[in-house]
Amino acid sequence: MKIIVTGASGLLGEEIADRFEEKGHEVIRLKGRGQLDLREVEPVMSFVEKCNPDVIVHTAAIKDVDEAERHPQETFVTNTVATRNVALAAEKTEAKMVYISTDAVFDGEKGMYHEYDETGPINVYGFSKLAGEREVRALCKRHFIVRTGLLFGLKGKPDNNMVLKLMKRWQNGEVVEAGIDQRCSNTYTLDLAEAIVTMALTDYYGTYHVCNEGRASRYEFYTALCTGAGFSEEQVKGVKASTIKFARRHKNSSMTSLLFERTFGYALENWEDAVERFMVEYKSKKEEL
């Protein structure tokens, strides 16, 4: 199959592209606006028609919640208008579309949200991604909407990789502040990418929550990473998220799935086990990073 991956230089996009290639598929990697501006409909339509893909995996987005809050119009153009353009192109070429969404479509008041819970974003980022979901549902019949949580992995640009930046700070002896009052479903990009490849090879379209099992605060997650890398847990300081963030944050946006396991026959393992596997990968590639 021929696969287009947008945002292919990012943490998740690169992982997805690699997984498809490892399984023998042809992958076209879109890595930025210099290659194709997804915000402009005609270039997108022309490019996709020329490539005639079987699947488009759309990961490109403004993901920084604080940046989104400061630049709402740009965020909606990038996260919603661009998604609309990709959905139009996918429908016209009869390609499947996989749209990467987020736990930020919920209000974060209860946690363990499933696919049928009411949405209710509380910040610009969440609103822009929910609007993207609506465009995909309205415009592309063959779609998968994948909601996921806080991502961690080794791919993407090192300067934009949250975990690699944390490791450098801990190596320098720094103490990192982390929210104790903001819980979510932390998700290993390797696990998520494998799930997306599995999904895209089927016709079981719809909206799925795909994340590692369980939930944790940012403090608990950072502590697991810090100690797993051999640093002292004292190098993570628990604080209220509101003291270190600009945009409004969710209290508990953790998710569970009523659909993924029942449709595809397996579930992603617990986030703590995923962190252990990630640390094995990190230590094996540490010298290359």
Image (cartoon, helix red, strand yellow):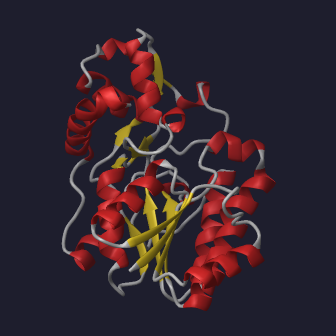
Q: Quadrant of the C terminus?
A: top left
| Among the 4 quarters of the image, the one containing residue 163 | top left
With respect to residue 27, does 235 lie above or below? above
Q: Is residue 85 visible?
A: yes
Say which residue appears at 78% left-offset and 54% top-offset: 74
Say which residue appears at 65% left-offset and 83% top-offset: 88
Say which residue appears at 19% left-offset and 43% top-offset: 273
* Left or right position of 106 against 170: right
Q: Position of residue 128 (x, y in %)?
A: 67, 61
31 or 60, which lies in front? Answer: 31
Q: Position of residue 230 (x, y in %)?
A: 24, 18
Which residue ends up furthest to the right in the rendered image?
A: 73
* Left or right position of 284 against 70: left
Say which residue appears at 77% left-offset and 52% top-offset: 72
Q: Is residue 256 visible?
A: no
285 or 107, which lies in front? Answer: 285
170 or 262, which lies in front? Answer: 170
Q: Position of residue 231 (x, y in %)?
A: 29, 16
Q: Quadrant of the N terminus?
A: bottom left
With respect to residue 12, does 134 lie above or below? below
| Among the 4 quarters of the image, the one containing residue 21 | bottom left
Q: Position of residue 122 (x, y in %)?
A: 63, 52
| Among the 4 quarters of the image, the one containing residue 246 | top right
With respect to residue 73, does 138 lie above or below? below
